[in-house]
Image (spheres, rainbow, N blue to C red):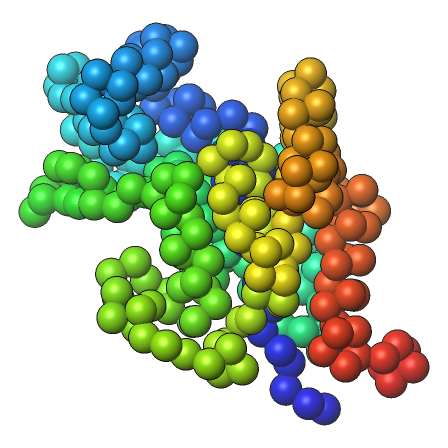
């Protein structure tokens, strides 16, 4: 049997794998902060200071906690992440990840799962599904000797997400190595070519990453919350007409769901492009 070919399924987190923004589940409520007021202040400070919105929200989280004399530690952030409300099908006796991994393996592909998010990495690491991911690329803090967050260490925004697609493409599983990311690497030597990459996202912050994935020969899917986002379907469908994504589907990862049928179809297409033929294995 030939060696399995590395293939990447890359997800945003907030609104893609879990409902809402991860900070809203328990962190902001624990500080008795109104969610609407918080994001309103983020927008205001971002505009007034001509700043990056992700850096502003991260710093404001620390500021609000400090005003209430609450230490923000890595452990506490992970505990807050445990409360993420995951979409259907991601967990269970036969989870989304298990089903797709087995399907891909049968077709000669080694499916790797990644998160690429503007959300808080430490919270995502507390999620019940975090163990399924080869790497989580997300915004994170720098900590002092007491393990207390002091300032943002990495902010991933709209456009910087695209940088991390190339890190996955070149097999660089960190954010600090800028030497290798800028070194020329022939396409046929890259561990995961874009043609074997899929990106799943839900909103405006994912558009550059989805567009880049499709532009370089990969596949992108825009998802929506079937319970909350039906009024914004027109906007999501325009992503297809504008050539920014390939597909739109509800964020339901249950067995035989539209999402599963769609992603398995893409995996099958990738496998065939890599030489897989059904009669050789089935």
Q: Residue furthest front?
A: 242
Task: Check the image and report above or below for 191 versus 249.
Answer: below
Q: If the image is split into quadrants, where does the C terminus sit? A: bottom right
Q: Residue furthest bottom?
A: 1
Q: In front: 236, or 37?
A: 236
Going 37% across and 68% down the picture, which residue do you hit?
172
Q: In front: 258, or 46?
A: 46
The part of the image, by quadrant, that contains residue 249 is top right
Task: Check the image and report above or below for 183 versus 154.
Answer: below
Q: In front: 17, or 117?
A: 117
Give x and y (percent) for residue 101: 67, 64
User: Does the rendering let one see residue 31?
Assistant: no
Give x and y (percent) for residue 253: 71, 43
Residue 265 shown left or right of residue 187 in the figure: right
Going 9% across and 44% down the picture, which residue do you hit?
144
Going 72% across and 68% down the picture, which residue do you hit?
270
Residue 175 shown left or right of residue 97 in the figure: left
Give x and y (percent) for residue 162: 43, 52
The part of the image, by quadrant, that contains residue 247 is top right
Going 80% across and 42% down the picture, which residue do you hit?
258
Task: Check the image and report above or below for 159 versus 31.
Answer: below
Q: If the image is split into quadrants, where does the N terminus sit? A: bottom right
Q: Residue furthest left?
A: 145
Task: Check the image and report above or below for 140 versus 107.
Answer: above
Give x and y (percent) for residue 115: 48, 50
Residue 141 shown left or right of residue 278 in the figure: left
User: Does the rendering let one see residue 25?
Assistant: yes
């Amino acid at each position: 049997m030939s060696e399995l070919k590395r293939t990447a399924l890359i997800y945003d987190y907030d609104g893609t794998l879990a409902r809402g923004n991860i900070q809203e589940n328990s962190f902001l409520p624990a500080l008795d902060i109104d969610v609407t007021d918080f994001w309103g202040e983020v927008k205001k400070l971002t505009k007034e200071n001509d700043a990056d919105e992700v850096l502003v929200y991260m710093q404001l989280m620390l500021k609000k906690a400090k005003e209430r004399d609450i230490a923000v530690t890595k452990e506490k952030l992970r505990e807050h992440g445990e409360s993420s409300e995951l979409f259907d099908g991601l967990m269970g006796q036969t989870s989304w990840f298990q089903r797709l991994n087995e399907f891909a393996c049968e077709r000669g592909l080694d499916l790797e799962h990644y998160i690429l998010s503007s959300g808080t990495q430490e919270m995502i690491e507390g999620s019940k599904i975090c163990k399924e991911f080869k790497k989580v690329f997300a915004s994170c803090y720098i900590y002092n000797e007491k393990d207390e967050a002091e300032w943002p260490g990495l902010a991933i925004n709209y456009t910087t997400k695209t940088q991390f697609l190339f890190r996955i493409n070149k097999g660089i599983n960190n954010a600090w190595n800028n030497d290798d990311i800028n070194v020329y690497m022939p396409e046929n030597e890259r561990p995961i070519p874009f043609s074997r990459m899929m990106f799943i996202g839900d909103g405006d912050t994912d558009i550059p990453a989805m567009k880049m994935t499709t532009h370089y020969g990969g596949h992108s899917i825009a998802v929506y919350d079937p319970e909350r986002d039906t009024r914004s379907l027109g906007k999501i469908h325009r992503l297809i007409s504008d050539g920014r994504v390939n597909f739109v589907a509800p964020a339901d990862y249950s067995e035989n769901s539209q999402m599963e049928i769609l992603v398995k179809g893409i995996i099958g297409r990738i496998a065939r492009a890599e030489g897989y033929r059904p009669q050789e294995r089935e």
